[in-house]
């Protein structure tokens, strides 16, 4: 996955569905694939990509609400969705990383 400025395409639309026990799956509307931590890795810096649904914990996420109105996506593996290097630039890698509360791990849900 990569960070990219809003462009109105379906490639940037995700469907969040309940999966039970407070977890969700996040599916890309265009590809139909789920947000997945590559190799079910628990290490910081593990790649996050789109992958065919397979029922593994690498595709399960909790949505943690933050006091500033943002959310943090917490993988069942224990890491969180994170922008590599915290740099908000097109093409930056989206990775799984240890929670640290930085802006690189905070997201805004647009429910349109």
Image: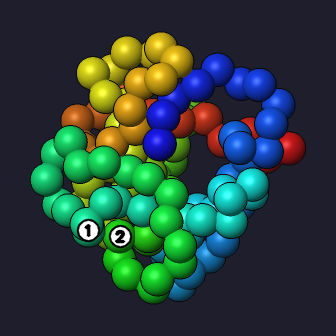
* Circles 1 and 2 in contact, beta carbons < 8 Å: yes
Mark 2 lies on a secondary structure that is: helix
Residue hosting label 1: 40
Q: Is residue 72 above or below residue 59?
A: above
Left or right of 54, for residue 47: left
- Quarter of the view holding residue 70: top right
Mark 1 lies on a secondary structure that is: helix
Whether residue 30 is visible here, answered yes or no, is: yes
Q: Quadrant of the C terminus?
A: top right
* Residue 20 pos. (x, y %): 53, 84
**Disc assigned to residue 10:** none
Q: Residue at x 38, y 51 (%)?
A: 48
> Is residue 55 or residue 81 the one in the foreground?
55
Q: Gap between marks 1 and 2, in whole Å?
A: 5 Å
Q: Residues within 10 Å of mark 2 (few under 14, many from 20)?
A: many
Q: Residues within 10 Å of mark 1 (few under 14, many from 20)?
A: some
Q: Residue at x 35, y 70 (%)?
A: 58
Q: Earlier in the sequence, mark 1 or mark 2?
A: 1
Give the image's coloring scheme.
Answer: rainbow
**Disc assigned to residue 58:** 2
Q: Residue at x 58, y 25 (%)?
A: 4
- Quarter of the view holding residue 55: bottom left
């Amino acid at each position: 996955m990569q960070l990219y400025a809003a462009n109105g395409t379906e490639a940037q639309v995700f469907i969040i569905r309940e999966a039970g026990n407070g977890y969700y799956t996040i599916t890309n509307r265009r590809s139909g694939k789920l947000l997945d931590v590559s190799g079910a890795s628990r290490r910081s810096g593990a790649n996050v990509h789109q992958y065919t649904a397979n029922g593994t914990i690498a595709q399960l996420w909790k949505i943690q609400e933050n006091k500033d109105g943002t959310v943090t996506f917490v993988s069942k593996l224990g890491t969180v969705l994170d922008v590599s290097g915290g740099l908000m630039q097109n093409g930056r890698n989206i990775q799984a990383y240890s929670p640290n509360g930085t802006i690189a791990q905070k997201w805004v849900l647009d429910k349109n």
